[in-house]
Image (cartoon, helix red, strand yellow):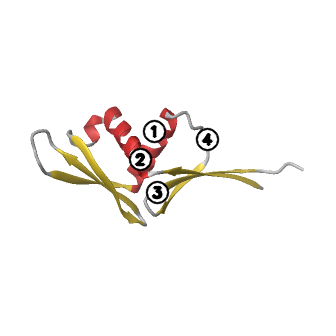
Amino acid sequence: MIVDSRHIQFSPEAIRAAVKTYRELFPQKQPPGLLGPILIRSDNPLILGVKIQAMGSSVYREIEMEEAEVAAVLIIYCRKMKIPLPRAAEKSMEVDGDRIALIVSKAMQVVA
């Protein structure tokens, strides 16, 4: 068996761009308002804290994005950026400091 594996690293700026894209495509999933700081609250399971400032307000409200939603955000952003992701590949995530890695692995059988 051969396993093809890639790590796609998302910097804090890329995570922010991915969340912004997600909010634009699915406005019903999160409250409206100005996107504020995004923090990694937990790495196992992965939880992002996303601060949103409502229009006319001076305070931020924090919502949490759980691991499955974060994975969807990163996959959607990869599609937007035309980063190929095989549908049949196994996908997981790792946190490295303030970065998130999307790990894509696909096992292939060796034919002798």
Label 4 crowd (10 A; few <14 / some 14-19 / many >=20): few
Q: Position of residue 103 (x, y in %)?
A: 57, 53
Label 3 crowd (10 A; few <14 / some 14-19 / many >=20): some
35 horizontally vs 98: left or right: left
Q: Secondary structure at mark 1?
A: helix
> Mark 4 or mark 1, which is nearer the start of the sequence?
1
Residue drawn at (26%, 37%), measured in percent from left and top?
28
Q: Position of residue 84 (x, y in %)?
A: 60, 38
Q: Position of residue 9 (x, y in %)?
A: 53, 51
Label 1 crowd (10 A; few <14 / some 14-19 / many >=20): some
The answer to the question of whether label 2 and label 4 lie on touching residues, with beta carbons closer than 8 A, is no
Residue at the disc numbered 3: 99
The answer to the question of whether label 4 and label 3 lie on touching residues, with beta carbons closer than 8 A, is no
Residue at the disc numbered 4: 86
Q: Amino acid at mark 3?
A: Arg
The answer to the question of whether label 1 and label 4 lie on touching residues, with beta carbons closer than 8 A, is no
Q: Position of residue 81 (x, y in %)?
A: 51, 34
Which is more toward the observer, 65 or 21?
Answer: 21
Residue at the disc numbered 2: 13
Residue at the disc numbered 1: 76
